[in-house]
Amino acid sequence: MIYPKRQISVNGVYAVIDCTRPQNYRFEGESHPFWEFVFVRDGKAGASADERIYTLSKGSILFHKPMEFHRIWSLEDTSPKLYIFSFEASGNLVRSLESLSLRLDEGGEKTLDKLVKLSRRAFEVYGEGGLKSARNEVLVQEYCNTLELFLLSLVRETPEMVLPADSSPDSRLFSQVVMYLRENISSKMTVEQIAEQFFVSPSRIKKLFSRYSGLGVMAYFNNMKIIEAQKLLDEGFRIGEVSEKLGFSNQFYFSTVFKKVLGISPTQFKRA
């Protein structure tokens, strides 16, 4: 008897969104503790995933790993039609989905069309596509099985299918700055210090972050710190220890930033 090891298992489904965004649409960005991928059914969109910037055209798909800060915006006066799938997953190959970006063939596009249609019959939804409850448990299993097979097919794709990140001078500089912030996440920093590190003006740094992240430089840096804070709190560190490790001036200010970013205090987070 052979007992198969689950290579990719879909353990929960959070949202299935089928939407068309207007021209000049800009999503401010978010991070969350589950997987997500966006598929461009039509039109063109720009997207960021931590420090990487992508240009997504019709047929493009981009994955976001848990706790990755990401955002999306319309490009070239198009109104992009998007599918957005959010889910929880585990398995030996699930990490192969990290930073994955591909252009789907016709078969892949049809599978996602099927998943969107199936979700309407399988789930009760609220808002734009958040899932409230199961409408039909058999169809929920069919949805999860279909999604698992789709994900497995993607990790077997050839390198020719992979979409490269944007390599323009501005996107490269943005990537370098974000990586620098990540490497110095325990430090206290100003925009002027960051600009000096890269021999550019503070105004250029501010414009880059406004364009690619939708946030101010310090707001983006604080978001990075709070994402790291969640990991440290989960590992058992005390709130004061986390505040000190991440370079906050005091625990009160850390708690204020934490609640502003997540909507709950560090104490509530630990209890949850």
Image: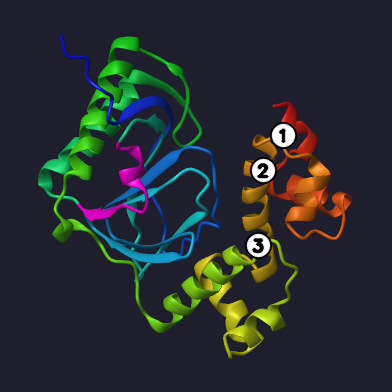
Which residue is denoted by mark 2 in the rendering? Answer: 232
* Mark 2 burial class by Cα count in 10 Å: few <14, some 14-19, many 20+: some
Q: Earlier in the sequence, mark 3 or mark 2?
A: 3
- Residue under the point 69% across and 27% down: 272
The type of residue carrying mark 2 is Leu
Image depth: mark 3 or mark 1 in front = 3
Q: Earlier in the sequence, mark 3 or mark 1?
A: 3
- Observer-nearest residue: 87 or 109? 87
Q: Residue 227: give x, y in percent of width and height.
A: 62, 49
- Residue under the point 73% across and 72% down: 189
Instruction: Locate residue 162 relative to residue 167 in the image: left or right.
Output: left
Quadrant where the N terminus sits is top left
Whether 167 is drawn above or below 264: the answer is below
- Observer-nearest residue: 239 or 46? 239
Instruction: Locate residue 107 relative to residue 117 in the image: left or right.
Output: left
Q: Earlier in the sequence, mark 2 or mark 1?
A: 2
* Mark 1 burial class by Cα count in 10 Å: few <14, some 14-19, many 20+: some
- For residue 269, the mark is 1
Which residue is denoted by mark 3 in the rendering? Answer: 185
Cα distance, mark 2 to mark 1? 12 Å
Instruction: Locate residue 42 relative to residue 191 in the image: left or right.
Output: left
In which image quadrant can residue 95 be found? top left
